[in-house]
Image (spheres, helix red, strand yellow):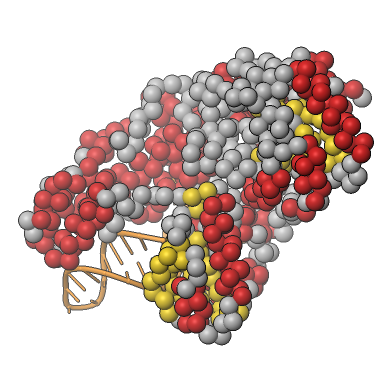
Amino acid sequence: MAPYPRAVTKAEPTNAEIALALDELGDLYELDGAIIHRVVAYRNAAKAVREASTSVAGLAREGRATQIPGIGKTLQEKIQVLLETGDIPSAAKLRAKFPAGLLAITRLPGLGPKRARLLYDELAIDSLDKLRAAAESERLRTVKGFGPKAEENVLAALAARDAGEGREERVVLSRALAVAEPLVAALRDHPAADRVELAGSARRWTDSVKDVDLIATAHDPEALARGAAELPTVAAATGVGAAGAKLTTYTGMKIDLRIVAPEQFGNLLQHFTGSKQHNEALRRAAVRRGLHVSEYGVLDDADGETRTCTTEEDVYALLGLAYVEPELRENRGELEAAAGGSLPELVRIEDVRGELHSHTLASDGRNTIQEMALAARERGRAYLAITDHSASMGFGSDVPPDELERQIERVRALDETTEGIDLLIGSEVNVLPDGSLDYDDDLLARLDWVIASVHTSFRMAREEMTARIVAACEHPWVDCIGHLTGRKIERRPPYALDVEAVIEAAARTGTMLEINSSPDRRDLIDVHARAAAAAGVPIVINTDAHKPSDFDYLRYGVATARRGWLTREDVANTRPWAQFARMRKRARAVR
DNA sequence: GCCGTTTTCGGCCCGACTGTTTTCAGTCG
């Protein structure tokens, strides 16, 4: 596979495609020996484009891409040329200068752009095969800066690559937490432990993680490290000592445990929670105040003293910043907000009062209405909508109209006799490829609540898929769109869709958008949820429960909402049912 | 190449590790 697949020519490159072009250009400039800050500027811009919630192509066409942080006049122009011609001239020129195999060499561990370029200039090595041959015949050592050890490392890196090691293997957060949370609990119970905290991307509640970072303090650090290595879920441990241990669980999860002195705990936890972008931006802001932040403390230029912090709050306070919740630490404006006192008060799990997406035996759920109702009530939900699949679902999960009629009666009857939770009858209706629904309007009108979701024909063209979902938004009996993009984390990309256009349609029609909490969906994603809420679209956090324990997925949906800067106000189902009911499109139309 | 409660020019996050060197550049996270 080519490292940078050329997009098929079409009018509107996606943000991901533009980001890929910028990343490629950064890599090529790096090989060309450009100063590193220029290269970094391209990579920062690529990341900003990839995360942008609006169409960067659209912005660039209007000359407004510069409003994305990290994009200036030059990149605005380059993106514009990319839109017009399908390529960036400087990239085409550099591609001709450096063979594609050179990039593969820079991706080997231990060989960066500088050393790869040196081998190319001195020995004309422009492929992994030539590199291997040169290492085997001991010719690498003829180049200044390379020795026998370098040859050995190159051959080891190539062998590891052939064995398929070092693949960027990320696991969905729920799988990582299933391992990490019991491990944290066990370590907290250890007699030598004082504090044990989850750090890293898991603490920021990212969609998936590469490994798990734990930070601890202990009055007997070595005993805690040994205790960690001896836990029953741990298959292997290395570097076990007073500083911590590197563990591998039987599930293959890599765990990095660091044990530090209590006075540095805040600095370490802040550093290892990340993200890289947040920490870099934090340090840049600190430098402007004459302060230098590292994992060990905060060095003050004024007196040459390094101050350590027992808590993260202290680290942020030293820099004149309000405490930033881990979910916000992605350098998406949180530092400016922390400096200006305008950080949002994020929605919490206990704020969510109702569940508006659940399945029972009538479709593909595993339990009765009553079992689901009691499970929801047990978890503190004040209302629950039963929303089985609609008529065309297939695989034996479809609910024909006459069956839905009976389901309405069943839910109404059970609601009469069930204390402590309001039961509502709804449906998760399929949006057919032409944008229509598969129940008649008069049946949909009799329900309390309708979610419309796409479950078929995922591979439609972007324009058609957008029109399909916008049509669903415009339907008078659709209250909410379910799992908008259809992505499955690490397994299935989102379908081609103009999310901006859907958000606009939702705002215009009074349709809500769901954050589906299923840990492999978390869809809306954070940046889309943020954009939707900013556009005034009410967000609903649902678990899409198919069995009682699925109600516990709520924390993943809430985490996505928090990563999207949402407050309790932004999330519609933080309200009691009576209040929520009036926000539904069907209620607004009647009034 | 970007960016500005010191700046429109001159900076650009911080530290560990490695292998090759006589003091450090390149790589990595």
Residue drawn 54% across and 52% down? A175
In the drawing, does residue A460 fall left or right of residue A427? left
Report the residue that reaches farthest toward the bottom.
A219
Indicate the quadrant where residue A302 lies.
bottom right
Residue drawn 75% across and 37% down? A368
Q: Position of residue A481 (x, y in %)?
A: 69, 30
Residue drawn 72% across and 18% down? A400
* Residue A510 in view, yes or no: no
Residue drawn 70% across and 55% down? A343
In the drawing, does residue B29 fall left or right of residue A570? left
- Return the residue nearer the eye: A117 or A245: A245
Q: Position of residue A128 (x, y in %)?
A: 19, 47
- Which image quarter is the C terminus of chain A in? top right
- Which image quarter is the N terminus of chain A in? top left
Q: Position of residue A42 (x, y in %)?
A: 41, 46
- Return the residue nearer the eye: A552 or A264: A552
In the drawing, does residue A425 fall left or right of residue A55? right
Compared to A264, does A45 lie above or below? Answer: above
In the drawing, does residue A527 fall left or right of residue B29? right
Compared to A232, does A328 lie above or below? Answer: above
* Residue A389 in view, yes or no: yes
Indicate the quadrant where residue B17 lies.
bottom left
Numbered-mark total: 0
Compared to A109, does A230 lie above or below? Answer: below
- Return the residue nearer the eye: A209 or A293: A209
Q: Position of residue A442 (x, y in %)?
A: 82, 15
